[in-house]
Image (cartoon, grey):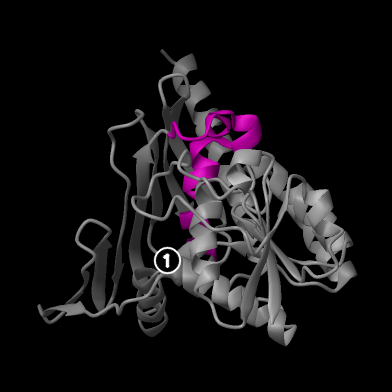
Amino acid sequence: MINIAVVGLGFMGVTHLQAWRKMPGVRLHAVVDADPRRLTGDLSMVGGNLAGGVRQFDFSDLRCYLTIEEALADPAIDAVDICLPTDQHAPAATAALRAGKHVLTEKPISLDSATAEALIHEAATSRRILMAAHVLRFFPAYEQLTRSVHENPLVRSAFFRRRCAAPKWSPWLKDPARSGGGIMDLLIHDADFCISLWGMPESVHARGHRDLARGIDVIHADLSYPDLGPVVISGGWHHPDSYPFSMEFTVTTDAATFDWSSAANDFRQYSESGEAISIPLGEKDAFEAELAYFADCVANETQPVRCPPAQSAMAVALIQELVESRERNSHANTSTL
């Protein structure tokens, strides 16, 4: 039995709590949060960009800690699940690894690639499991796309889009020093997924706009890969409150085009013969699958292959490149006016 501590009871912490409670072979042993009210199990004040979920928990059988230091001193805890604000991911993960705990940390693994590399070195030194929670890799539609691309590797065009309203449920998200902004927070998913398929691009070119006071942080980025057609990542944060969350992709290979959107959740394959078919995706919770995979890595003392930390660090580096390219091109466009 693996004893887990969830650190941070915000939106993602609540999502993970629900998944851990259902999982065989895992005991939710402790929760950590600086807010005493949340430690009573009252999480009614927690918001997010996905609907639904429990907001009242019974923590009477758990150990409740106000600080991560208290939890890391608990010898019964085998692994920590870090769901803190982004700027705290790497410091908390480093402390946990040094305390001998296995670590699952919410994405991104850090706010910069140098810190991510240092964290990976820390995990190797401590001989503990480190995994970033890139849940997109466990969504059925993206799992199916991975299989389809592996079977049809001659990719001529790929388009990934992810967008939502600017967050109001956690004020720290609008502080780029803490969250990295909308591109790091949201499109890290698509950057990581492209890396999972094709590795790091040779070059990038991005345009967009950031005005966090208005809730805008958007980007349209071209990723250049050898032997592939154009790969485009688009989206970000739009004006607050009313703009709905959505994600989608269209990938064209020599043999077929694969298309999916979260609105319809219908994975379609359009072949060169003119046939259009809907590929069943199956029913599973991606968050449960992600956490179960991490638990399995801990139980078997194996490093994560589906979410290797080295690729999580690459995703951070790629987002940094995209944002830097956007800023360069924005300044260049302004200077010509």
The picture places residue 102, in percent across and down from the top left corner, at: 76, 69
- Disc 1 residue crowd, few under 14, some 14–19, many 20+, Cα 10 Å: some
Residue at x-position 63% and y-position 51% = 316
Q: Position of residue 142 (x, y in %)?
A: 39, 69
Is residue 297 placed above or below 259 in the rendered structure? Answer: below
Location of residue 111 in the rendering, given as x and y in whole percent from the top left corner:
67, 44
State whether residue 136 appears in this view: yes
Can you name the residue that lies furthest to the top here?
Answer: 337
Q: Is residue 278 left or right of residue 22?
A: left
Determine the main secondary structure of the stretch shown in magenta: helix
Depth check: 15 or 337 in front? 15
- Tell me which residue sits at (46%, 56%) in the image: 190
Magenta region includes residue 197: no
**Residue 297 percent location from the top left of the image:** 67, 80
Q: Is residue 21 above or below residue 164?
A: below
Q: Amino acid at mark 1?
A: Leu
Query: Helix, strand or loop at disc 1?
Result: loop
Q: Residue at coordinates 40% horizontally, 70% vertically from top-left?
A: 285
Residue marked by disc 1: 228
On whether residue 180 falls in the magenta region, the answer is yes
Position of the N terminus by quadrant: bottom right
**Is residue 198 visible in this depiction of the protein?**
no
For the record, the magenta segment spans 167-195
